[in-house]
Structures are given as C-alpha cells and as structure tokens.
Amino acid sequence: MLSATSGRTSSTRCSSSRATRSPRVSGQLHTFVPSRPGAGGIEQVTVDDAARATLGTRRGAVASIEVSRMAFGRKNGLTIEVYGSHGSISFDPERLNELVVDTGSGGARTLVTEADHPYAGARWPPGHVLGWDHTFTSQAADFPAAVRSSTQPSPSFAEGLAVQRVLGAIADSASADGTRVEVTAH
C-alpha cells in the first residue's frame, strides 16, 4: 500500500524526443519496522513507512516523489514543489497560508488569505489565517457548486482512478526491485 502522512514531492520538466511515450514509473517501498505492538499483541505492519518514485509523463516531464511516515520533525510535511522552464511554485501544508512563486527573480511569498483568493468570500476577512479544517470546507463547497452550475467537479472519480493507477504501478515497480513499469489505462 502506498500512502503518505509526511513527505516531499517535486517535479521538474525535461525535454524528450519521445514525447508521446506511455507514462512510466519506477518505485521503491520500505517498511522500517515490520511488526509493532497492537491491541492483540505484536502485529505485522501492513503499510509502508517510506516510498519514493520517479515518474515520466507522456510529454517527457519527470517527477520525483518521496514520502515517509517516519520523517522526524515533520508533522505534515506534504510539500509540493514544481519546477519548470519559467519558474517554480512551492506549497507546504505546515505553512498552510503561504504559496511561494519564483519566476526567476527570487521566491515571492504569496498569502492565500487575501481578498483575491478564490474562496475568500467563504472564510474570515482577508489576513486571517486558515486552518487544516478550511481545506475540507473548500472541498465540500466545490461539490454543490458544481452541481448547481452543472459542471464536472474536480477532482472527479476518473481523476481519482488515474491517481490510483499510478500508485498501483509504483507498487508493482517496487515489487519488481524498482523496474520501470508502464501506467496502464485500465
């Protein structure tokens, strides 16, 4: 099983002459402590403590993902960093109110609590900090809004299924000692 409670995700774009190839992944999963005390005594651990993967997209971009349930000092370090040819963007849920954008002149911290934020009207006045609960409030608000406007919500079931296919391919790769595996469409 591949899931994360603490980690780091980064993505970087690269050029490729095979820009229409199928998406592929290479992954490793590791359980540091294979058994732990449980309600009925010592129990086998059925989840991974750490995982990492390299992903290649159809258009030639490369992404690396590292996650760990055992990352000391990180309570919710699900940092996402994306690097491209025109800049980068970084988001860290441990600093929920900030987004860092760098277009080549140094990172600019953007507060997501300002009046121009898409969910500003559903929250406190601008400048008041957000909490973890607000992320779920925003998700819950998106669904009825999509129903009212007859638009497809995002993420959709199909998008969630696509993510699960990538995670399954990472687990398959890890079972094959990190051999690159193609992400299947079905």
Image (cartoon, rainbow, N blue to C red):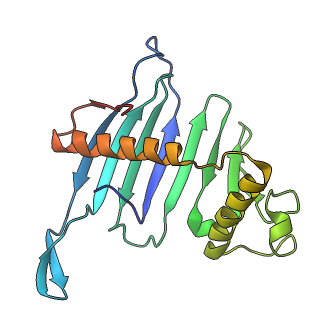
- Whether residue 32 sits left or right of residue 83 in the image: it is left
Q: Position of residue 53 (x, y in %)?
A: 34, 43
The image quarter containing residue 47 is bottom left
Residue drawn 22% across the image and 56% down it: 30
The image quarter containing residue 178 is top left
Is any atom of residue 109 visible in this view?
no
Marks counted in the figure total 0
- Whether residue 46 sits left or right of residue 134 in the image: it is left
Give 28 or 86, whichever is nearer the viewer: 28
Give 69 or 47, whichever is nearer the viewer: 47
Q: Position of residue 135 (x, y in %)?
A: 64, 67
Give 163 or 9, whichever is nearer the viewer: 163
Q: Position of residue 118 (x, y in %)?
A: 80, 56
* 176 lies above or below 24: below
Is any atom of residue 121 visible in this view?
yes
* 93 lies above or below 128: above
The image quarter containing residue 136 is bottom right
Q: Position of residue 132 (x, y in %)?
A: 61, 73
Residue drawn 29% across the image and 58% down it: 50
Hey, which residue is sitting farthest left in the picture? 42
- Whether residue 47 sits left or right of residue 185 in the image: it is left
State the quadrant of the C terminus.
top left
